[in-house]
Amino acid sequence: MWKWLLLALFCAFVALEVSVLLLVGGWLGVGWTLVWMIGSALLGVMMVRVAGLHALMRIHRRLREQELPTDELLDMAMILLGGMLLIAPGFISDAIGLLLALPPVRWLGRQAFHLFYGDYLPVPFPPGRGAADDVIEIRADT
């Protein structure tokens, strides 16, 4: 059931994307539409490269501090999704991709994720206490 609903939503999105592309392309002209498509694809590649590396550095820093990088991983996922949407041709996907490039939009996305899925996230260890402190050794003296 869900597969068919997702397929129908995807097909509707593609149809809407093509119709908007044809409408805006008719208004801008073929040349400017091609310039927009190539420019947004290059912007998407640069966004994934620069912002993705920045997110990787933040993930590495949190891991060095022995903290869970949940927010940084969510940021990286939204950056990658935004970059892929910018690379894909179309004006609606470009608008969504540019929105995902904005830090306040990513903050809202993180808050929504924590609201819906926060119960499923692992509880981080308190400062100064790691997983090794929970080990109980039992010795059999014979």
Image (cartoon, rainbow, N blue to C red):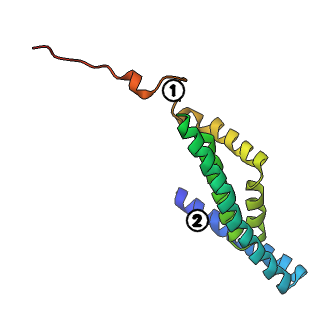
The single residue placed furthest to the bottom in the displayed view is 30
Q: Nearer the viewer, mark 1 or mark 2?
A: 1
Residue 74: image location, x then y, percent: 62, 47
Residue 125: image location, x then y, percent: 51, 26
Q: Which residue is mark 1?
A: 125
- The Cα atoms of the two marked residues, 1 and 2, are separated by 41 Å
Relative height, residue 139 to residue 102 (above, below): above
Q: Quadrant of residue 53?
A: bottom right
- Judged from the image, the secondary structure of the residue bearing numbered disc 2 is helix
Camera-nearest residue between 65 and 94: 65
Residue 55: image location, x then y, percent: 64, 50
Relative height, residue 141 to residue 73 (above, below): above
The numbered disc on residue 7 is 2
- Which three-letter amino acid code belongs to the residue tagged 1? Phe
Residue 124: image location, x then y, percent: 53, 29
Residue 94 visible to the viewer? yes
Camera-nearest residue between 100 and 112: 100
Residue 19 visible to the viewer? no
The single residue placed furthest to the left in the displayed view is 142
**In the rendered structure, which disc, 1 or 2, sits on the residue that comes first in sequence?**
2
Could you tell me which residue is drawn at 54 percent across and 38 percent down?
Answer: 64
Could you tell me which residue is drawn at 54 percent across and 39 percent down?
Answer: 63
The numbered disc on residue 114 is none
Camera-nearest residue between 74 and 42: 42
- Which three-letter amino acid code belongs to the residue tagged 2? Leu
- Judged from the image, the secondary structure of the residue bearing numbered disc 1 is loop
